[in-house]
Amino acid sequence: MAPHSTLLGSDITQLRAAGVSLVLDLADGGLPRVLHWGADLGPLSRQALEGLRLALAPQPIGNPVDGPVPVAVLPEQSAGWLGTPGLVGNRGGRDFSTAFRVSRSELTADDEQPGTGGSLLVRAHDETAALELELTVELTPTGLVRQRASVTNRGESVFALDALHLTLPVPAAATELLDFTGRHLRERSPQRTAFTQGLRMRENRTGRTGYDSAYLLAAGTPGFGNRTGEVWAVHTAWSGNHRTYAERTFHAVSLLGSGELLLSGEVLLEPGASYDSPWQYGSWGVGLDELSARFHRRLRSRPHHPQVPRPVVVNTWEAVYFDHDLGRLRALADAAAAVGAERFVLDDGWFGSRRDDRRGLGDWYVSDEVWPGGLGPLTDHVTGLGMQFGLWVEPEMINEDSDLARAHPDWIMAAGDRLPGPARSQQVLDLGRPEAFAHILERLDDLLTTYPISYLKWDHNRDLVEAGHRPTGRAGVHQQTLATYRLMDELRRRHPGVEIESCSSGGGRVDLAILERTDRVWVSDCIDALERQQIQRWTNALIPLELMGTHVGSGIAHTTGRRHTLDFRAGTALFGHFGIEWDLTAADPEDLARLAEWIVLYKELRGLLHSGTAVHADHPDPAYRLHGVVAEDGSEALYALVAMATSELYPTGPVRLPGLDPDALYRVRPQAPGDIPDGNAHHWGVPLPWWTPEGVTLPGRALASAGLQAPVLYPERLVLLRATRVGSASAR
Ligand code: DGJ
């Protein structure tokens, strides 16, 4: 039976899914409060739910108001909350504070399948402020909480909305915070702090998801790790300005909150107009891996999630940069096809006057200068080799030195008449302007109609600085973000088979809203494998491997100058959507042969890598990392043991293999290719006793707790371990 909706007959409700319980309290007609978000409490009777409410009701002592201070998912000062307010705005200087009363609440759940989550829709009004609020709080089948709010102006004058934040409470036991910072070439750097009293506010004002964004903001029990400790995290699914915060007060309230960061005057609600907040996602787990798996399963359940094996990509950027030449690119396509590539992506430089990164953005016409016969000769060659063809675009941007800017200078976003300083010599095209939007849509639609393009690499290479609409002078990041979504949605509607990669000077636009309309993210412009180990690990905290673009670069990394073995580069790219970004026409035959071996392995394993559960060991030695993927049914797993540096330990000692079925028996063996397939880390080394083609057979439980001896590796090398279920542990 399909899920059905009922008016909520009770003022307290419990949703359960995938080991999580969410208990929502709507007592006294106020906005919903989360009584519990975390480990499943089992099915609770109404009496038990009321008992929980009673047990958790705070003592009304010394509060700003008489009586307890309930903190709703949209916290309000009218309820006595003096922390960060849920809704900030005013109507001509009045109505600065809200007091919403719930008029209707409706629960949608599947009675036939209890324990698969559900959705609570709450409608509330503030008659004084003349505002209506619609709040959706869901527990998804994978155990993620997600919520959003929509506020409508029911008054007769404009309501200026400054902020709308939603929150989720975490227990006092969550005393440590983890969030992320980053920059170009070094995305998603973790940072840990104590969760002390006060507000830790992470704001992003770059007009894109941003490098220096919280990404995930997690609070956990002391020392929580990949596999241990309880941890709660929120993610703000928004690709424009946003805030994500952790707040702890002396009232023993700890919250994780988030919302869009609205610029001054950006949302002025006319009578009858509404504002929709981004979705806020919350995930709980024992260890980060469990928390991440909920996001991964959710993303995998998207209707458009790629169902076909992720093709091996060859991207032209680091191979030729702006040197577009049919002969050279044909040769690259030949070399790539010969090693097993399946998709050829033509990067920046094919259009208008774009012979370098200073001009041409906005002129989305194939350049006669470098492509006198159009792109046809190249697309014919690529498709003739059996590869798909992909094309780079950057639709939200414009160079001042472009025909488009010369024809429509007022399509450039600016605060009044003052143009923002250029970044990468470019400006932002105002897609909130209908004519500009229509022009770009027509250009992209035409390209997708003319050429056999099955993939767009959609780039976005600057922050939005003073991004206003002209001539009104109103702040425009909110509209720009929505217009970008509309543009992608419309192109997908017109060209349903076309995949889109979200790129933003590398990994500057990675969030769950952009992933509602894209099929992979470009993780970073840094394809130095050592840096990538770190960047990919943390990108994977939110999104699964098949959505992460991971490429093998040339022997010397273009962005760091480091030199790495092909095995280290390819073994790093294996854990993602594999590609090549290297001038293969200049590679030596041994490298090409070895790369072909890695591609054979990727093709063999991509089914596992792109459907299994990602696992990361809590290895005590900072010099070594162990991560992997375990099949959902526990039948097999692939692990990478990575030496990030030299170790204090010599030999290295055992590593534990997490995530296997504890009751099954596994054969673990080295998987070639790899840096030391014969077990010889050093020229004087003696192979580990178990490092043989037969490997060693042990129960999953023993591998997870006793582990097995790891080979000593040179720094910046890796080996692969393959585990195959061979029976039941108890049968032995
Ligand atoms: C930034 C991207 O991250 C790169 O991969 C490449 O596409 C360049 N832009 C092209 O300008």
Image (cartoon, rainbow, N blue to C red):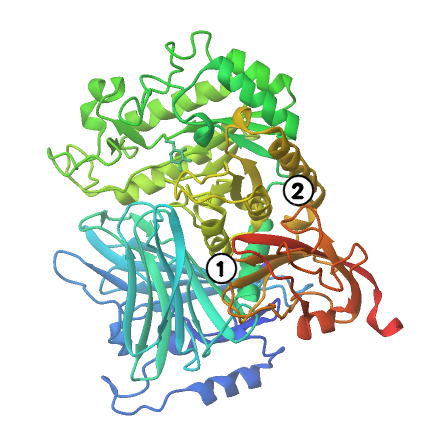
Q: Is residue 140 visible?
A: no
Residue 287 has which mark? none
Q: Which residue is mark 1?
A: 645
Q: Which residue is mark 2?
A: 602
- Work out whether residue 138 or residue 597 is closer to the camera in this orientation and state it: 597
Residue placed most toward the observer, 430 or 23: 430
On screen, residue 192 above or below 345: below
Mark 2, residues whose alpha carbon is within 10 Å: few (<14), some, or many (≥20)?
many
Q: Crowding at label 1, few (<14), some or many (≥20) Cα neighbours within 10 Å?
A: some
Q: Position of residue 447 (x, y in %)?
A: 45, 19
Q: CA distance from mark 1 to mark 2?
A: 26 Å
Q: Considering the numbered disc 1 on the image, is that residue within a helix, a strand or a loop?
A: loop
**Image-quadrant location for residue 228:** bottom right
Q: Quadrant of the C terminus?
A: bottom right
Direction from residue 254 to residue 638 in the image, left or right = right
Q: Position of residue 233 (x, y in %)?
A: 45, 66
Q: Is residue 602 above or below residue 384?
A: below
Can you see residue 509? Answer: yes
| Amino acid under disc 2 | Tyr
